[in-house]
Image (spheres, grey):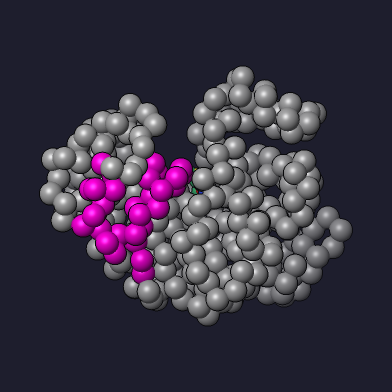
């Protein structure tokens, strides 16, 4: 595993039977059921309760893949779609790194993107902080006989990698969450995180970031933000913070930005060749990926090419009429952002 290094001191690590050992600071990192743990504190971030995720994992372990999917289809339609829709992996197609050797899926969640990346890259490192998701991926790699996916537990701000390790990094629905488990000003943490992403990329390597647009059309239509409150992205940060605390949702830390904001942040982190795409239906389901270089025709695309699947999406398509064509690209609900080292 030549990509790994000690998250504490960046020293060389040696793989033993059940752990990694740092040759410099002597720290040990357990390997549990084949998953290395480079982070030991508690952290759970998932759209479902831990109990439910455990139940899904138990079911996967004891059943065939077909029976598992039948079970998901019956008990949890949303998760069935999330685990089976191959368009989720389309994020890989906006990347054009120099090599397709090693990719890091950072904040990989249940691993759908990782499995799509595994068809294109030689080795996929699937990193998350939430333990059970990694065990789920581990189990799926066995069931699907995918041998080039390596799940591992780590914190995005304490990475167990050597410099210049990855040809590409996918960061889908994660950048906004990084301040959540780390102390400091959210923007400073996000900037530091992006600098570290750049460090572990090979020269000419690329990141792709899937994330919401702070001034996305959806927020003008009253859709809630990450803290489940309406309107917070459109407020100045200090006001969003006060409002979030007053409503009992804690501090406002899941920062998103505008095109300008992301561009500034990425440039500050040392990235070049920054490109923006509008993923439709969303960055989670990028069934269509529209290049915002030709953003003035996004309106036509949404009206004439994009096929909405839900009530919400149909409503969004109608709202597009109220935005002048030249502004629409700045209000794309989500972005896929590609940037190069
Ligand atoms: C919204 S999910 C996205 C999952 C996946 N990328 C996908 O598109 O399906 C965000 C993921 O980031 C992980 N995450 C959040 N903060 C993290 C951190 N500091 N270090 C590592 N993973 C983190 C969460 O556990 C969660 O699985
Ligand atoms: Zn060390």
Q: Could you say where residue 16 lies in the image, as x and y percent from the top left?
A: 84, 63
Please report the bounds of the magenta region as a residue range: 274-303
Q: Residue at x 37, y 74 (%)?
A: 273
Q: Could you say where residue 182 lies in the image, as x and y percent from the top left?
A: 46, 54
Give the quarter of the image for residue 102: bottom right
Q: Is residue 324 left or right of residue 316?
A: left
The answer to whether 206 is drawn above or below residue 116 in the figure is below
341 vs 194, nearest the viewer: 341
Look at the image and say whether residue 284 sits in the magenta stretch.
yes
Q: Could you say where residue 161 lies in the image, as x and y percent from the top left?
A: 63, 68
Q: Is residue 335 left or right of residue 297?
A: right
Q: Could you say where residue 165 lies in the image, as x and y percent from the top left?
A: 62, 73
243 vs 105, nearest the viewer: 105
Q: Is residue 177 left or right of residue 134?
A: left
Residue 6 in sight here: no
Look at the image and say whether residue 128 sits in the magenta stretch.
no
Q: Residue at x 61, y 19 (%)?
A: 74
Q: Residue at x 58, y 30 (%)?
A: 80
Q: Is residue 252 left or right of residue 87?
A: left
């Amino acid at each position: 595993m030549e990509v790994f290094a000690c998250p504490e001191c960046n020293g060389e690590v040696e793989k033993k039977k059940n752990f990694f050992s740092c040759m410099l600071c002597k720290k040990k990192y357990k390997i549990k059921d084949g998953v290395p743990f480079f982070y030991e504190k508690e952290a759970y971030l998932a759209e479902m309760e831990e109990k439910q995720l455990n139940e899904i994992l138990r079911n996967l372990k004891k059943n065939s893949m077909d029976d598992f999917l039948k079970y998901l289809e019956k008990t949890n339609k949303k998760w069935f779609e999330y685990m089976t829709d191959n368009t989720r992996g389309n994020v890989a197609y906006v990347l054009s790194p120099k090599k397709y050797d090693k990719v890091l899926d950072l904040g990989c969640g249940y691993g759908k993107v990782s499995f799509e990346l595994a068809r294109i890259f030689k080795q996929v490192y699937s990193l998350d902080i939430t333990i059970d998701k990694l065990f789920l991926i581990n189990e799926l790699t066995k069931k699907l006989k995918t041998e080039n996916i390596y799940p591992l537990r780590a914190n995005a701000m304490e990475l167990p990698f050597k410099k210049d390790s990855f040809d590409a990094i996918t960061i889908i629905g994660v950048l906004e969450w990084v301040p959540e488990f780390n102390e400091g000003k959210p923007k400073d943490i996000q900037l530091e995180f992006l600098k570290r992403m750049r460090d572990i990329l090979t020269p000419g390597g690329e990141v792709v970031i899937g994330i919401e647009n702070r001034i996305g059309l959806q927020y003008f239509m009253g859709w809630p933000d990450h803290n489940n409150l309406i309107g917070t992205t459109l407020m100045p940060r200090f006001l969003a913070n006060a409002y979030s605390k007053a409503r009992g949702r804690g501090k406002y830390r899941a920062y998103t930005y505008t095109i300008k904001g992301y561009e500034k942040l990425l440039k500050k982190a040392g990235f070049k060749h920054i490109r923006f795409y509008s993923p439709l239906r969303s960055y989670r389901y990028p069934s269509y990926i529209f290049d915002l270089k030709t953003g003035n025709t996004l309106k036509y695309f949404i009206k004439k090419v994009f096929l909405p699947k839900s009530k919400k999406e149909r409503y969004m398509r109608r709202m597009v009429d109220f935005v002048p064509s030249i502004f629409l690209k700045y209000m794309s609900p989500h972005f896929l952002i590609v940037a190069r080292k």
